[in-house]
Image: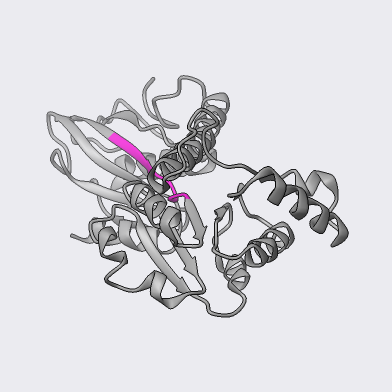
Amino acid sequence: MEWTKAIEELRAGRRRGVLVTVAAVRGHAPRGAGAKMVVAADRTWCSVGGGNLEAVAVARARELLGTRGSRPELLTVALSDKAPYQHGVQCCGGEVTLLLEPLPVAPAVAVFGIGHVGLELARILARRDLDLHLVDSRPEQLADERLAVLADAVATVHVHHVPVLPELVLAELPPGAHVLVMTHDHAEDAALCDAALRTPGLGSIGLIGSAAKWSRFRRKLADEGHPDEAIDRITTPIGLPGLTGKDPSTIAIGVAAALVATLEREAEGADGAQAAADPGRVPAPGAPS
């Protein structure tokens, strides 16, 4: 179906959209319940009936794109010559209720270092709707048989084997990507922290390790010219303070839980902005209130 391909296209291009579905019909209408359309900022796919109905739906969908919220909403449109709209008259005589579901861009997370903890973390994060980037300088850590545990991933998994200068991957990450540094080599970790602070547009930056490791890193980052407020962007140790176990799965659970909390705060922030911009809004412009 074309609408499913449209969603896949938006996902692959990391573009936002809105899925519009005819949820219910009373009387006569151009399309029956279940008809779908996908709306992006610059184009649409499929149809929920054309005419005024579709114009109202597209206008409201693009308003939702502007607020960057993720809350779905219902929109009811009367198709009567007694209900004029800014887009004209559609006199089928029925009433259509549309469900508008925002299709946000999936969060991006990059894990640098797919060792024991990194692989356990990847297994957990792969159950989320993410763009998950796995980066390691050691080819054996990214071997197909080792990553087979991610075969049923919900996430879209991107594997980066970078034998030299894995920090170059940072520039390839999408805007807002969250970075977790946990490689096998402290020198590699230090280079990644330095490069992450120099890469604009990243989300959170987390570093695995002890207080002694961070003390050395902090001095080194300061010596390389990073101001304190920039260095403070790096969170270490990562995970949940209450989890004291040191086995890889326990560490990974704590790191994943802390990251998911960050992702949820981001989503709530977007929904809060949507609510502030449009409190209690259900009908679209020109639709009956």
Left or right relative to 111: residue 283: left
- Residue at (37, 52) in percent of width and height: 120
- Residue at (44, 56) in percent of width and height: 118
Image quadrant holding the N terminus, namely bottom left
The verdict on residue 251 being magenta is no
Q: Is residue 18 above or below residue 98?
A: below
Q: Look at the image and name its color scheme.
A: one colour
Left or right relative to 205: residue 80: left
User: Which image quarter: residue 187?
Assistant: bottom right
Image quadrant holding the C terminus, namely top left
Q: Is residue 152 above or below residue 92?
A: below
Q: Return the residue nearer the eye: 196 or 35.
A: 196
Left or right relative to 78: residue 62: right
Write down the region rendered in magenta. Answer: 99-107
Left or right relative to 148: residue 184: right
Q: Return the residue nearer the eye: 11 or 144.
A: 144
User: Residue 226: x, y in percent?
Assistant: 83, 55
Q: Return the residue nearer the eye: 289 or 262.
A: 262
The verdict on residue 101 being magenta is yes
User: Residue 38: x, y in percent?
Assistant: 32, 51
User: Residue 17: x, y in percent?
Assistant: 40, 50
- Residue at (31, 47) in percent of width and height: 127
